[in-house]
Amino acid sequence: GENVEQHPSTLSVQEGDSAVIKCTYSDSASNYFPWYKQELGKGPQLIIDIRSNVGEKKDQRIAVTLNKTAKHFSLHITETQPEDSAVYFCAASIVNQFYFGTGTSLTVIP
Amino acid sequence: GAGVSQSPRYKVAKRGQDVALRCDPISGHVSLFWYQQALGQGPEFLTYFQNEAQLDKSGLPSDRFFAERPEGSVSTLKIQRTQQEDSAVYLCASASGGATGELFFGEGSRLTVL
């Protein structure tokens, strides 16, 4: 089955700096790559997604890039704010399953 | 309701007890997923329903785990003879289509087995 690896597991940045989280996947048949933000005690919430026919997508301060050849995708958050502090999960979707990474705990220091 | 609702939010069970976890998906959502999330880990797939049909149960860790969605709406995840290793947050998610669109997660049911 699909294997998704996510790095780093923890990340601390100063407010206003950028944060980058990277994921790799193993199954070239995966065709949908969402990113979820999970706050303490809450369920994950979709923040951005990208499909396999697109290389980059941006939504305000958040962007995602996908390299299908290398089987990796990344989340970029610019101008970080304290409310960006949370755990972020990448995922790869194939057939009717989502495979999640192990998460990145992001702390934005005011 | 406006979102996915799960109950109970917290459940403490003694080893060997049976538990039932309920999920109310967003009205009209065809797809429903159950995930298990251990502390500090990402969600792990358990099972998938399309309407009332359980199309994939390959992630259920043992025959002690059983899920149903009899009328294509509310779903129940049942764990029989709970073990300590079953302690985790159980997340339910629904989607209007299949697994290539947004998943809407509930807040989860935290199960602690003593």
Image: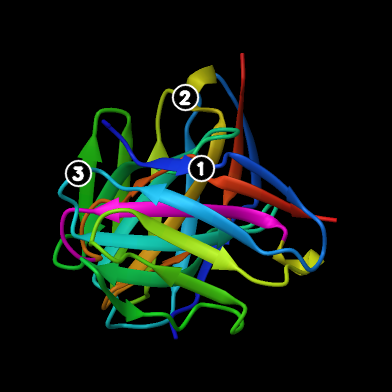
Where in the figure is residue B69, as x and y percent of width and height? 33, 64
Looking at the rendered structure, the kind of residue marked 1 is: Ser
Chain letter for the residue marked with disc 1 in the picture: B
Mark 3 crowdedness (10 Å alpha carbons): few <14, some 14-19, many ≥20: some
Q: Residue at x 17, y 53 (%)?
A: B96
Indicate the chain on which mark 3 is placed. Answer: B
- What residue did someone put label 2 on? A80
Contact check, label 2 and label 1, Cβ < 8 Å: no
For the C terminus of chain B, the image quarter is bottom right
Region in magenta: B87-98
Q: Tell me how many marks there are.
A: 3
**Residue A50, image quadrant:** bottom left
Mark 2 belongs to which amino acid?
Answer: Thr
Could you confirm whether marks 3 and 2 are on the same chain?
no
Describe the element under mark 2 as helix, strand or loop: loop
Q: Is residue B90 in the magenta section?
A: yes
On screen, residue A108 above or below A92: above
Our reading of the magenta stretch's main secondary structure is: strand
| In this rendering, position of residue B87 left or right of residue A54 | right
Residue on which the image places disc 3: B27
